[in-house]
Amino acid sequence: MAGEFALIEHLLRQTRGIQTPWPPILGPGDDCALINPSSADLSWAVTTDMLVSGVHFLDSDNPRDLGWKTLAVNISDLAAMGAIPRYVTLAAAISTQDALEHGWIDAFFAGFVDCLSAFDVALIGGDTTRGPRIFSVTAMGEVRSGEALRRCGAQADDDIWISGNPGYAALGLHAKLKGTVLPEDIATIADNALHRPQPRVALGRELIGIAHSAIDVSDGLLQDLGHIANASGLQGILAESQLPACPAGVDKWLWNPCLLGGGDDYELLFTAPPNARDSIDLLSQRLSLPLTRIGRMWPLQTPCDASTILANPVQLLNDTNQPIDLSGFCPGFDHFA
């Protein structure tokens, strides 16, 4: 089937069986979609992410997995603010060969639809053009006005928590690019973390009223904690002994950079007061999701004391509360570094 509009119609047919709780007033087909919040006391949370061939993915990647991930990374931003995902748009640049042969783009879109269905999200529009593979999603979610989790809300003495299994996605990427052989069970977890991230939507919703701040870990644990620290005017102090342990059979010198600076985790990093520990432990059990306490937020130190370094937004302390030199670690992903 040839032509841009025939391709669009071909792809949209795959979405017409999806039932969502709040369908748009008007979906694809006109110059704009029309949407309303499901309740007058809700605000829109809106985010956009691009995935570019050679930067965020390889052309050899499984296209169905890539379709899932393209949407999942955007839903993760909504989860970080405690929002319920509702609507998305998809803009895609693909080659003429992709458009004419359909096999690759059909598989990609099938993965995208998998994610739409998993999170009850409606595709309400988008765009296509010719070019190297680039995908841009704008995702919209709802959160009660005044309740959104933000980066700037952390308070001194808050605990720092991380969900799930951070570090595994970067471990999977390293194995893929460098040919590193991982234990079979670790390789499976790492591959799934890299290619099929699971946005923590349910966790984000539950953290409203518990957490003071939150961010999704897309660019690296150190870097994203630094965003919370800087936005809140605090320091994030991590305890080496509390970090997720190096998996059995994996070299610690490989694991530490993956955990601290690898990124691509799409886990939630959040802060909460110490009196919320029991609630968070119960939440972990209820969601069957590891929630690990890894440090706490401190006031900025002036002058620096024995266990912090002045003006450094994130510190990692060893068992004797001495700072570990992080200069050798890449703090996280930067598109222009």
Image: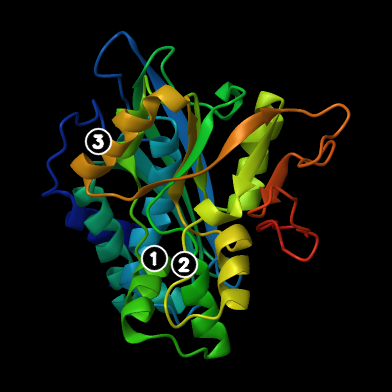
Q: Say which element carries label 2.
A: helix
Q: Report the Cα–Cα distance between label 3 and label 1.
A: 24 Å
Residue 193 in percent (x, y) is at 39, 65
Please report whichever mark, 2 or 1, sits nearer to the chain's N-terminal start: 2
Q: Residue at x 57, y 30 (%)?
A: 151
Q: Say which element carries label 1.
A: helix
Pointer 3 local density, CA inside 10 Å: few below 14, some 14–19, many at least 20: few
Tell me if label 3 and label 1 are in contact, CB under 8 Å.
no
Q: Which amino acid lies under the numbered mark 2 shown in the image of this protein?
A: Ala
Residue 85 in percent (x, y) is at 31, 36
Q: Which residue is mark 1?
A: 193
> Could you say which is closer to the camera, residue 66 or residue 284?
284
Q: Which amino acid lies under the numbered mark 3 shown in the image of this protein?
A: Leu
Q: Nearer the viewer, mark 3 or mark 1?
A: 3
Q: Nearer the viewer, mark 3 or mark 2?
A: 3
Q: Which amino acid lies under the numbered mark 1 shown in the image of this protein?
A: Ala
Residue 13, label in figure: none
Q: Report the Cα–Cα distance between label 2 and label 1.
A: 5 Å
Residue 106 in percent (x, y) is at 28, 70
Is residue 321 rendered to the left or right of residue 41?
right
| Residue 26 can be seen, yes or no | yes
Please report whichever mark, 3 or 2, sits nearer to the chain's N-terminal start: 2
Q: Residue at x 48, y 36 (%)?
A: 270
The furthest residue to the right: 303
Pointer 2 local density, CA inside 10 Å: few below 14, some 14–19, many at least 20: many
